[in-house]
Amino acid sequence: MHTTPAAFSYDYVRVESVVSDYVPQWRRMDFDAIVAIARGGLVPAVMASTALGLPLLALAYERRSRQVSWFTAQTPPHDAHVLLVEDIAGRGTTLQDCHAFLTAQGHKIHIFTLAHDAESRLQPDFGPEIPPGWRAWFPWERESVTPAFAATNNSPDRPEYEYASWAIDLDGILLPDLPVDQYESDLAGTLAQRDKLPPNSLLPDRDLTTLTIITGRPEKDRDRTQSWLDRHGFHGPLVMRDASRYTAAQTAQHKAEAIVARGHTHFIESDAIQALEIARRVTVARIFWWNGTTALSIYANEAPRLTLV
């Protein structure tokens, strides 16, 4: 199971917040242009360029040959003061080589990255440091957290989207979700009834037979749950709720943490409230609420300063 390093999520709200933190300081620094490193630096660079009213330029980087070139037709004027923007200052050579390229052209450079840590090869002038043991997770590199992508050593030989990792809820997706009050009034009888239910006639439009199942059912129900899955041809890994760690009311938290720990990029949930809570906790993964007929994409962010105007 893919458990380390932990994913430090950067959804678009966080990206904009990080950029905005530095805008007042940057406006006093007389930059001539913003230079993004394509592709990862483009999103924050667009935000910075817009906030500062400066031209947006970009560099291309070929990782295998370590060759840097201009991605845009426009280039900075001679001796320009530029803000070089990348999503992460990592252990590789991208940021270092791009910095050297601009330096060789005589430009004055400051560096901004959305994330760096103590082991980054080149420390940026601006940008937050993420905690030890974590790695940045961006929407434009959603699949980078999957075990399949990690096995490529950041050199995929297929399109990134082919490394996506899907998981699904169980009750309400593969079979009908029986009412809570029915469990409360007759637990044994309801469990026996559930064991005999057939799969839903209408299922999400994917091959579900090998997908990971992350369910709120407690671990003590594993045998009967696995028996039902085997009987109906669903053979993906089964992740159940550890009742010693999560109460039934904490099912959404259990699912969210399992999604991140296992490196899943997409999850289909049958309960709308749980889907919202999972989306709030796992802001980069794609969360879908399956209402029985349609999958709806769910996004959720806290609004801590909500006021009436």
Image (cartoon, rainbow, N blue to C red):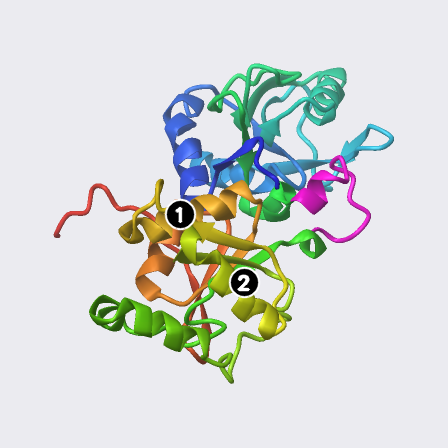
Residue at 70 percent across and 39 percent down: it is: 150
Residue 59 numbered tag: none
Q: Is residue 155 magenta?
A: yes
Contact between labelled residues 2 and 1, with CB atoms less than 8 Å apart? no
Quarter of the figure that contains the N terminus: top right
Closer to us: 257 or 164: 257
Identify the secondary structure beneath mark 1. helix
Of label 1 and label 2, which has the lower sequence position? 2
The x and y percentages for residue 249 are 27, 52
Mark sitting on residue 254: 1
Q: Nearer the viewer, residue 221 or 241?
A: 221
Which quarter of the figure has residue 28? Answer: top left
Q: Where residue 141 sits in the image (x, y, percent)?
A: 61, 44
Region of the chain picked out in magenta, as a range:
147-160
Q: Nearer the viewer, mark 1 or mark 2?
A: 2
Identify residue type, mark 1.
His
Q: What secondary structure prevails in the magenta region?
A: loop
Question: Which of 58 and 255 lies nearest the eye of the viewer?
Answer: 255
> What residue lies at 78% left-to-right and 39% top-to-bottom?
155
Residue 224 visible, this orientation? yes
